[in-house]
Image (cartoon, rainbow, N blue to C red):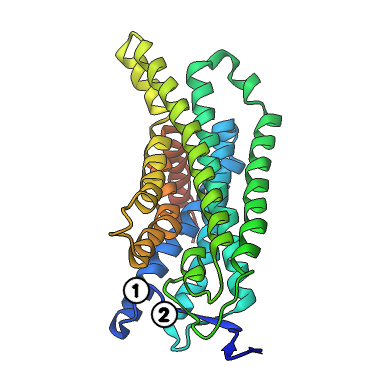
Amino acid sequence: MVSGNLTHVTEFVLMGVSERPELQIPLFLLFLLIYGLTVTGNLGIITLTSVDSRLQTPMYFFLRHLAVINLGNSTVIAPKMLVNFLVSKKTTSYYECATQLGGFLVFIVAEIFMLAVMAYDRYVAICNPLLYMVVVSHRICLLLVSLTYLYGFCTAIVVTPCVFSVSYCSSNKINHFYCDNVPLLALSCSDTYIPETVVFIFSGTNLFFSMIIVLISYFNIVLAILRIRSSEGRQKAFSTCASHMVAVTVFYGTLLFMYLQPRTNHSLSTDKMASVFYTLVIPMLNPVIYSLRNKDVKDILKGFLTWKMCTHILFKTIL
């Protein structure tokens, strides 16, 4: 399509993590490993929390959905990224780009609020243990998870059309490894005030309210733990939320690093590196964090591995 002297783009070129040819294969192998571990770890968490009767509590219900979100977020980004390491023409169509941005927004917003929901769950478990199963009933769990996904979807269907409502002319090289709103708007040849404002409002609001929920929950959790007289009781209470605290610190630390940088130091390259962390590395780390710091999950994994070894030895003996 032509309007005046401007050629409107029908596809974009993703510049990727690095443009250096000698790094494409090593980076492909690295991110293939990361994605493989992400899929294995999160599917493992989903399977364990679905089939084992000892993990049928609200905490593991929310953990299962965090694993679903992490798996979804990585899958929206990683396959296209991996393909682009191996091809010379790193293009994505206009509508494919819009779909990827929409999918990314659904899962990243859902993750922000799922972590907030999990913080609230730990607050109720530690501060009101006698009312825990009443306050966080199965019905409430379903409602909170449904609202999390619904809000992520609503964010995507508002922000994505705004980003793609502007004109993209001539320049179609996205300085990123996936279709994100900031590098996309940087390519626009029309006024981006409205979409930039919408992106800023949604990003700021989501981060602010989710962090408020997390901070208030953990402030009350810390006060409750300090009121426990025995060191054993304090340690036991702390251990129930230690995994979530680590996951929250890593995730929000990365987002705050991105959003609180001074404008003089801010660059798309820095955003790109931070994006690698919260779209690919954190989804890989979360199953490890929740497995290694969770006694129930470790015991079940040990039991499963022992059963597999015994089955293998028995099978070899019979043969």
Q: Front-most of 187 and 278?
A: 187
Answer whether residue 48 is visible to the viewer in this image: no
Q: Is 197 left or right of 317, judged from the image as shown?
A: right
Mark number for residue 175?
Answer: none
Q: Position of residue 257 (x, y in %)?
A: 34, 50
Residue beneath disc 1: 27
Q: Front-most of 81 and 3?
A: 3
Question: Mark 2 belongs to which amino acid?
Answer: Phe
Mark number for residue 85?
Answer: 2
Q: Position of residue 140 (x, y in %)?
A: 68, 30
Write the residue at 44% across / 20% down. 220
Write the residue at 52% across / 37% down. 209
Do labels 1 and 2 touch, CB within 8 Å? yes
* Position of 116 relative to 253 (above/below): above
Q: Position of residue 151 (x, y in %)?
A: 65, 46
Q: Is 152 left or right of 265, judged from the image as shown?
A: right
* SS under mark 2: helix
Question: Residue extending furthest top?
Answer: 229
User: Which of the two discs, 1 and 2, labels the residue nearer the N terminus?
Assistant: 1
**Alpha-carbon distance for marks 1 and 2?**
7 Å
Question: Mark 1 belongs to which amino acid?
Answer: Leu
Answer whether residue 289 is visible to the viewer in this image: yes
Q: Is 103 left or right of 174, judged from the image as shown?
A: right
